Amino acid sequence: MLPVTNEKKAFRKTQLIWTAVFTLSIVLIVAITVGAVFIVEKRRITTQFDGELRRTADLIERRLKAPGMMGMLRTFRGVDPLFVPRGEAFQFLFPSGEVFLEVGEQIGTPETPVEEGFSTEGNYRIFTKKIDLGDTTIFLRVGKDISDLIERSRRLLSMYLLVILFSAGGAAVFGYFVSSLALLPVRNAYNSLKRFSMDASHELKTPLSVLRTSLDVLKYREDLPDDVKNKLGIMEKNVEKMSKQINQLLLLVKSESSFNGVVKERINLKEFLQQIVNEFKPKAESKGLVLEIDCPEDLFLETEKDTLRVILENLIDNAVKFTEKGKVIVGARKEGRLTIYVQDTGPGIPKKEQKRIFERFYRISRNTEGSGLGLSIVKELASRLKAKVILESEEGKGSTFKLVF
C-alpha cells in the first residue's frame, strides 16, 4: 500500500496563514499610521491654502478702507487689470448679491444671501469676507485655482499607497521567514513523533506476526476444548484488527517521498474492480450479502493503480463490515466526469456526523469497530489522485461513497 501524508501541505498552509496574518497586521498598522499622517498633511496643505486666501482678503480690506479707495474701485469696473495673476479671481458684491466689480478669472455669482466663509466652486477655492466701509457694506470674494492643491493631494495619496505596497511586500517576505523559524520546533516535534510511530508500529508487527502464527497452529489442534477454541478465535480476530490498525498507522506516517516515481497506468475499470471485489466476496458471502459490479466493459482510467486500490479496499471493507443485509454495489460510470462509487444497504450515517466522518480517528457513535483511520486515508489518497470524495447517506437506507475525477 502507498503511504498517505499531507504534512508538507499542512505545514505550508500554516506558514502561509501565519504569513498572511503577519502581513495584514503590519499593513493595517502602517495604513493607520500613514493614513493619519496623510490626513494631517492634507489638512495642513488645505489650511495653508486657505490661510493665503484669508491674508489676501485682509490685505484688500485694509486697502479698501483708505480714503477715496471705494470711488477709485468703481472706475475700474469692467477693466481686467494686467497685474492679476492667472488662476486668481476677485469679486466685489453688494449685500443684495449684485456684482459691481470683478477682476481676474470668472468664478460665477453666489446665491443670495451672500455668506462669509470658505467654499469650493468648480475648480476654485473661494473665501468670502464682509467688509464694512462706514456708509457702505460690501462682500469681497477671493478665489484661487486649486489644481495645484489637488495635484499635491494626489501625490500624497500615491506616496501613501506606495508605502503600504512596499510595507506589504516587506512584511510578507519577513513574515514568511519568521513563520518558517516559528514552525521549525513544530516540524521537529512532528518528525520525532512520526519516527516514533513508525518505529513503534514496526516493533509491534513482529510480535503480532508471532501471535498470528501461533494461533494458526493452535486452532487446528483437535485436542483443544471448544471454549479454548472460541477464545483462540477471539484472539485471532483481535490480532487481525491490530495488524490492520498498525498498517493504517504506517500508511499515515510514512514520508511523502514514497510517492516519488509513481507512474500512472491506463486500466480497464471493470477488470480492476472485479479483482478487488473477488477479494471481498468470501467475507460478504459469510454475512449473506450480495457483492456485485456495475461498470461498462469499455471504461478506462489513467491513474495510480495502487493508490486507487487502497481507496476502494477501504470503502468496500467498510461497506461489507457495516451492512447486515442486502447488497453492496461497486460501480463506475462516466457522465461528464468519471465517477467510481461504492453503494451499500447498511444503516446509513447520521447527518450530524457526516461532516466529521473523514477526520482521523473519528468513529460514528454506534461504531465499536475500526480505528477511524480508513476514511481519512480515503480522503487523503483521493486528493493525491486529484479526485473528490462525496458522501451520500440517509439513515436506514444506506450510504454511497463517490470518487469523482
Image (spheres, rainbow, N blue to C red):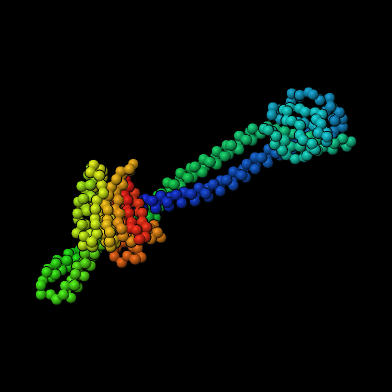
Give the left or right position of residue 120, taking residue 266 as reference: right
Whether residue 262 appears in this view of the structure is no
Task: Indicate the position of residue 148 as horizontal and vertical percent values.
Answer: 63, 33
Task: Indicate the position of residue 33 as horizontal and vertical percent values.
Answer: 56, 48
Q: Is residue 329 above or below residue 234?
A: above
Which quarter shows the C terminus? top left
Outermost residue toward the right in this view:
135
Q: Nearer the viewer, residue 265 or 260?
A: 265
Give the left or right position of residue 386, taking residue 34 as reference: left
Q: Residue at x 33, y 41 (%)?
A: 336
Label tally: 0
Q: Is residue 161 above or below residue 326?
A: above
* Residue 363 quadrant: bottom left
Q: Residue at x 34, y 58 (%)?
A: 397
Q: Residue at x 26, y 59 (%)?
A: 320
Task: Indicate the position of residue 76 as horizontal and vertical percent values.
Answer: 81, 25
Q: Residue at x 64, y 32 (%)?
A: 147
Which quarter shows the N terminus? bottom left
* Residue 232 quadrant: bottom left
